């Protein structure tokens, strides 16, 4: 990932989905398809008809190669090797689908990436003749091996800019024509699908001189999804199970890799809560914003969702009631505790609208059920308590 777009608000496509888009624009991709079970893997390997295949775990994170998510196999042992890969954790993501592809005979790995440059108010294109898994180190060590151009979206991408990129990146002359075409196509994809980022790393030259997109990333601007119907439909297939469950209930849930579950109202409160947890030396397991005016049912649903994540050791509920009523939040929590089985401690801070009623409901509950709930006064105190209760 030479370009790391950490913004949460883009819809990421899986590699196999991105490659389908690339292919529809005439960029060559390796022969293969996605599989959901070892039997399926075996079938694809047979369909491909090539002895040597690659098993690529489809998880929405970069650097799979170094994390053991890319496995070389033969048509004969692909099913058994995929058995080890299915269910494996790759950088916090469980492998549920595997892209099975013919194995390319790689002579050279190059790089093409396109993203938005907010500072320059343009689209930036990066090209390098040395791509692959070590692209970050290469970029840091040899900045002169990277070609970079900012495109004014009003004028679009000029051919001369693409030619300059080819020279700057040191692309071998005999591949100028092919790489030129790929850059233009990738740019057209970026514009057509209102992407925030697209990347081919590695862009491979095979030993017989052909070019393939051996990997692919395509992230679509969330705010454009109402126009990008095709992409919006893919979303069904991209989010994790939990994220999809949350979306269907209208809960804004993003999984992170720590172990303190966070429920807060409003994006600002959620972020401030996460910051405090980090300050205390802990790590949030998620970002869950119940928004303004949440009902008790929504609060209960949020709690149900959060404890489905096995990493969660403690939940911190941080509510500052404006439109949101503390008493309704309290009711939702009590409902959650009584109706769902959970033995995870919960730290609760309630302030603002109907705070008194909210605290009373909670205190009543606590009299009968001690040890499960910790009512705190301030969010700082709450963050500290959550970290103390095992959230490190
Ligand atoms: P990433 O680590 O998540 O970016 O996954 P990639 O799809 O980029 O794969 C990582 C590395 O695996 C590539 O840089 C290649 O070196 C290697 N690889 C992927 N596909 C093939 C293939 O078909 N043949 C060979 N020989 N290597 C491959
Ligand atoms: Mn890659």
Image: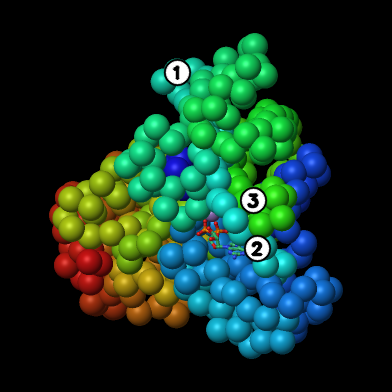
Of mark 1 and mark 3, the one earlier in the sequence is 1
Q: Work out whether residue 292 or residue 203 is closer to the camera in this orientation and state it.
A: 203
Within 10 Å of disc 1 (Cα), the crowding (few <14, some 14-19, many 20+) is few
Mark 3 surroundings within 10 Å by alpha-carbon count, few (fewer than 14), some (14 through 19), many (20 or more): many
Looking at the image, do the residues carrying marks 3 and 2 touch, with CB atoms under 8 Å apart?
Answer: no
Q: Which residue is mark 2?
A: 105
Residue 226 visible in the shown view:
no
Determine whether the beta carbon of the residue marked 2 sits less than 8 angstroms from the nearest atom of ligand 1.
Answer: yes
Q: As displayed, is residue 116 above or below residue 129?
A: above
Query: Does residue 356 sit above or below 121 in this rendering?
Result: below
Q: Element under label 3?
A: strand
Residue drawn where x is 54% and y is 27% of the image: 167
Which x, y percent locates residue 346?
Answer: 30, 67
* Residue 49: image location, x then y, percent: 82, 74
Q: On the rendered structure, is 33 left or right of 359?
A: right
What is the distance, in whole Å, between disc 2 and disc 1 at their CAs? 39 Å
- Which residue sits at x=51%, y=21%? 150
Query: x and y percent of residue 188 in the render?
Result: 71, 30
Query: In the picture provided, is 29 more to the left or to the right than 280?
Result: right
Q: Pick whichever of labels 3 and 2 is earlier in the sequence.
A: 2
Q: Which residue is mark 1?
A: 120
Whether residue 184 is visible: yes
Tell me the quarter of the picture where residue 323 sits: top left
- N-terminal-most mark, 2 or 1: 2
Question: Measuring 56% from the left and 22% from the top, which residue is drawn there?
Answer: 164
Name, please, the residue furthest toward the top. Answer: 155
C-alpha span from label 1 to label 3: 32 Å
- Residue behind mark 3: 205
Between label 2 and label 1, give the one nearer the viewer. 2
């Amino acid at each position: 990932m030479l370009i790391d777009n950490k913004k949460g608000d883009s819809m990421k496509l899986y590699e196999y989905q991105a490659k389908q888009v690339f292919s529809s624009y005439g960029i060559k991709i390796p022969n293969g398809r996605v599989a959901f079970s070892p039997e399926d893997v075996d079938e694809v390997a047979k369909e491909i008809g090539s002895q040597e295949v690659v098993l690529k775990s489809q998880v929405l994170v970069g650097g799979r190669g170094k994390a053991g998510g890319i496995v070389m196999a033969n048509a004969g042992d692909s099913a058994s090797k995929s058995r080890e890969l299915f269910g494996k954790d790759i950088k916090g993501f469980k492998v549920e689908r595997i892209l099975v592809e013919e194995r390319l005979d790689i002579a050279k790995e190059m790089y093409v990436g396109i993203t938005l440059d907010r500072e320059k108010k343009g689209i930036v294109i990066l090209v390098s003749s040395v791509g692959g898994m070590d692209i970050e180190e290469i970029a840091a060590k040899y900045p002169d091996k990277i070609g970079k151009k900012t495109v004014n979206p009003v004028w679009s991408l000029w051919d001369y800019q693409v030619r300059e990129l080819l020279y700057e990146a040191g692309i071998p002359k005999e591949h100028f024509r092919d790489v030129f075409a790929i850059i233009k196509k990738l740019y057209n994809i970026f514009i057509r699908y209102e992407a925030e980022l697209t990347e081919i790393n590695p862009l491979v030259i095979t030993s017989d001189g052909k070019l393939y997109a051996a990997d692919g990333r395509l992230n679509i601007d969330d705010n454009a999804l109402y126009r990008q119907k095709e992409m919006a439909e893919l979303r069904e297939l991209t989010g994790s199970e939990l994220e999809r469950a949350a979306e269907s209930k209208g809960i804004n849930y993003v999984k992170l890799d720590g172990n303190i579950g966070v429920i807060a109202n409003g994006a600002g409160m959620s972020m401030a809560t996460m910051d405090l947890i980090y300050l205390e030396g802990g790590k949030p397991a998620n970002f869950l914003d119940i928004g303004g005016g949440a009902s008790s049912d929504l609060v209960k649903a949020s709690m149900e969702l959060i404890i489905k994540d096995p990493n969660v050791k403690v939940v911190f509920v941080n509510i500052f009631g404006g439109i949101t009523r503390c008493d309704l939040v309290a009711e939702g929590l009590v409902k959650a505790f009584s109706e769902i089985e959970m033995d995870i401690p919960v730290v609760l801070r309630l302030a603002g609208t109907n705070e008194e009623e909210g605290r009373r409901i909670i205190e009543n509950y606590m009299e009968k059920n001690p040890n499960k709930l910790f009512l705190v006064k301030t969010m700082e105190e709450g963050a500290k308590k959550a970290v103390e209760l095992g959230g490190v």
